[in-house]
Amino acid sequence: MRMKTVSLTAAFLLAGATVASAGCNWSKDVVAQTPVDHGKMTRVEVAEAPVDAWLIEYLEAWQNA
C-alpha cells in the first residue's frame, strides 16, 4: 500500500511538472516588465561611468591572460 501511495504521488508530481513546463513559452526572450522612463536616461562615455575596483582588476587580468 505504501509503495502504491509513493508511486501515485510521484506520478502526480511528474504530471504537474509537465503541465507547468508546457504552460511556459520557453522559445520567447525574457522581457523586463518594469516600465522605464527613457526621458531620465542620459548618455555617458565609458570612462565617465563608475566602475568598481574589483571589476577593473578582473578586466585587466582577463586582457593579460
Image: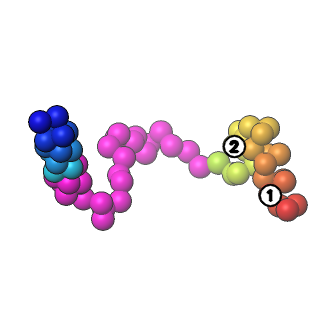
Q: Position of residue 64 (x, y in %)?
A: 88, 61
Q: Position of residue 23 (x, y in %)?
A: 18, 54
- Which quadrant is the C terminus positioned in? bottom right
| Residue placed most toward the observer, 25 or 10 | 10
As drawn, the label of residue 49 is: 2
Q: Position of residue 18 (x, y in %)?
A: 20, 54
Above or below for 63 versus 52: below
Q: Which residue is at 21% across, 49% downward? A: 14
Residue 31 counted in the magenta span? yes
**Residue at numbered disc 1:** 62
Q: Residue furthest right?
A: 64
Mark 1 surroundings: few (<14), some (14-19) or many (≥20) residues within 10 A: few
Residue 20 in sight here: no
Query: In the shown orientation, is residue 36 left or right of residue 42?
Result: left
| Residue placed most toward the observer, 6 or 34 | 6
The stretch of residues the image draws in magenta is: 17-43
Nearest to the eye among marks 1 and 2: give it.
1
Above or below for 48 versus 23: above
Q: Position of residue 2 (x, y in %)?
A: 16, 34
Q: Which residue is at 47% across, 39% downward? A: 40
Q: Are marks 1 and 2 in contact (CB under 8 Å)?
A: no
- Which quadrant is the N terminus positioned in? top left
Q: Please, what secondary structure does the residue beneath circle 2 have? A: loop
Q: CA distance from mark 1 to mark 2?
A: 20 Å
Residue type at tag 2: Ala
Mark 2 surroundings: few (<14), some (14-19) or many (≥20) residues within 10 A: few
Residue type at tag 1: Trp
Q: Please, what secondary structure does the residue beneath circle 1 have? A: helix
| Residue placed most toward the observer, 16 or 20 | 16
Above or below for 56 versus 52: below
Among numbered discs 1 and 2, the one appearing first in the sequence: 2
Can you tell which quarter of the image residue 5 is in?
top left
